[in-house]
């Protein structure tokens, strides 16, 4: 289902109100635009700084376009494996959300280690350090 369909279904089930729907749409429309634009800028910057990688990505695009008569569609884009890896590396180096805040609701156990935080406190996860 599309995002708006999910929000409407949640509204019908009294899981979200009109204000909540507006906030979700604003988030996806405006904040999503900024993060996408930044990811594109950083991708272009990194490709410009690494000519050999840029050449390989360009060659892949040319080959895939040639195989498909110069047409682009979703299935063609899914065949750009090297370019996808370049974009993912850009997002790893320059994440659109470098920090995540979470509320602790219970004790956390990772592997064999018990991590104790105060319940109902917020912790800040820095994704750049992961």
Image: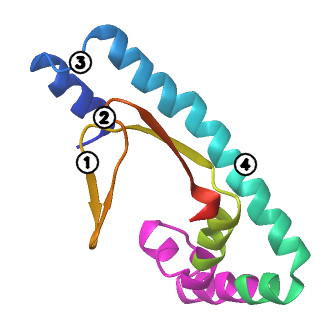
Residue linked to disc 4: 38
Task: Report the side of 51 relative to 127 (left or right).
Answer: right
Q: Quadrant of residue 119?
A: top left
Q: CA distance from mark 2 to mark 1?
A: 7 Å
- Is 109 drawn above or below residue 111 in the view shown? above
Check contact, mark 1 vs mark 4: CB within 8 A. Answer: no
The number of numbered discs placed on residues in the rendered structure image is 4
Check contact, mark 1 vs mark 3: CB within 8 A. Answer: no
Q: Secondary structure at mark 1?
A: loop
Disc nearer the start of the sequence (4/3): 3
Q: CA distance from mark 4 to mark 3?
A: 30 Å
Mark 4 is surrounded, within 10 Å at the Cα level, by few (under 14), some (14 to 19) or many (20 or more) other residues, namely: some
Task: Report the side of 57 relative to 127 (left or right).
Answer: right
Residue 107: which disc?
1
**Residue 70 in view in this figure:** no
Residue linked to disc 3: 16
Query: At 78% from the left edge and 55% from the top edge, which residue is drawn?
Result: 41
Most common SS among magenta residues: helix
Which span of residues is magenta-colored?
58-84
Disc nearer the start of the sequence (2/4): 4
Q: CA distance from mark 1 to mark 4?
A: 36 Å
The figure's colour scheme reads: rainbow
Screen quadrant of the N terminus: top left
Check contact, mark 4 vs mark 3: CB within 8 A. Answer: no
Disc nearer the start of the sequence (1/4): 4
Q: Tell me residue 58's x, y (percent).
A: 75, 82
Q: Is residue 43 magenta?
A: no
């Amino acid at each position: 289902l599309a995002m708006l369909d999910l929000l409407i279904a949640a509204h019908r089930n009294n899981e979200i109100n009109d204000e909540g729907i507006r906030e979700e749409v604003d988030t996806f429309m405006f904040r999503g635009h900024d993060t996408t634009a930044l990811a594109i800028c950083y991708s272009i910057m990194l490709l410009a700084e690494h000519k050999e990688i840029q050449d390989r990505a360009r060659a892949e695009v040319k080959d895939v376009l040639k195989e498909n008569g110069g047409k682009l569609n979703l299935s063609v884009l899914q065949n750009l494996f090297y370019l996808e890896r370049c974009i993912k590396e850009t997002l790893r180096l320059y994440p659109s959300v470098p920090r995540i805040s979470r509320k602790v609701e219970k004790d956390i156990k990772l592997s064999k280690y018990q991590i104790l935080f105060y319940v109902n406190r917020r912790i800040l996860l820095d994704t750049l350090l992961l």
